[in-house]
Image (spheres, grey):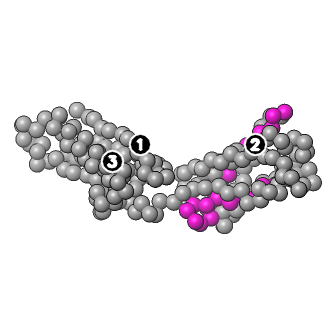
Amino acid sequence: MIFGFNTDIKHEDTIFHVQSEAREGELLLQTQVFVRGRCVGKRASSYADKASDSGFTDQQKEQSLRDQHKLVLDAVRDGHLEQVLDKRDAPEALAEIKELDVHWLNANAVHSDRTLTMRLRVTDGESGAEGARLTIRFARPDAAPFYSQVVADAGGHAEMSIEVDEPSLPDSSILVQASYSGRKATRKFELRKVEA
């Protein structure tokens, strides 16, 4: 019998996805913890010594897995996750998980000489995300959306320019999606006139 549990749980500003399953072939009960799609650690316990016991039922196995799943959830909730993870299996420490983000550097002055220019920076934690691919969707109420793609330089910087008249800018929006190392970050920016 194959069974498992999946739970999303939030601690402070981070959402953890906790996934537990019985790995029948390896006689293991395994719980993995993911943050933003990346595995941050595992907890595994063998039930090989019990598997040969004819009195060990699927219900007992399921309860053991449920208890392990709850132990990890409680550790996340209490902020002590690293204390319950198997150190040898953790691919990276929680502190090393980096946040992918998109920053609009020239938000106060994007339009001049019939050109909309956005200077953006993609960061992975505190570092620039070199080679991040940005897909930009410029949407106006009176026209079809305009799409563009740019790639970030060594510092994570990218620039995009669109020829557009200023009267078209109010009520327009720009959606920017950055892709980097298998992760994505999306930001939506609303355009408005800055009063002088």
* Circle 3: element type: helix
Magenta stretch: give its range. Answer: 116-142
Q: Secondary structure at mark 2?
A: strand
Residue 141 coordinates in the image, percent (x, y): 81, 34
Q: Nearer the viewer, residue 179 or 7?
A: 7
Marks 3/2 in contact by CB < 8 Å: the verdict is no
Q: Amino acid at mark 3?
A: Leu
Query: Is the residue marked by circle 1 packed among few (<14), some (14-19), or many (20+) residues within 10 Å?
Result: few
Which residue is labeled 1 in the image? 8
Residue at 26% from the left image edge and 34% from the top image edge = 2
Q: Residue 191's spot in the image, x, y percent? A: 78, 46
Which residue position holds label 2?
173
Q: Earlier in the sequence, mark 1 or mark 3?
A: 1
- Identify the residue at the far left of this view: 54
Image location of residue 56, percent across then percent down: 10, 38
* Disc sitting over residue 73 in the figure: 3
Residue type at numbered disc 2: Ser
Horizontal side of residue 7 vs 136, given as left or right: left
Quadrant of residue 154 within the rendered picture: bottom right
The CA distance from mark 1 to mark 3 is 9 Å
- Residue at position x 87%, y 41% in the image: 168
User: Which residue occupies 58% across, 49% down?
Assistant: 184
Q: Note whether residue 164 is visible.
A: yes
Sequence-first tag of 2 and 1? 1
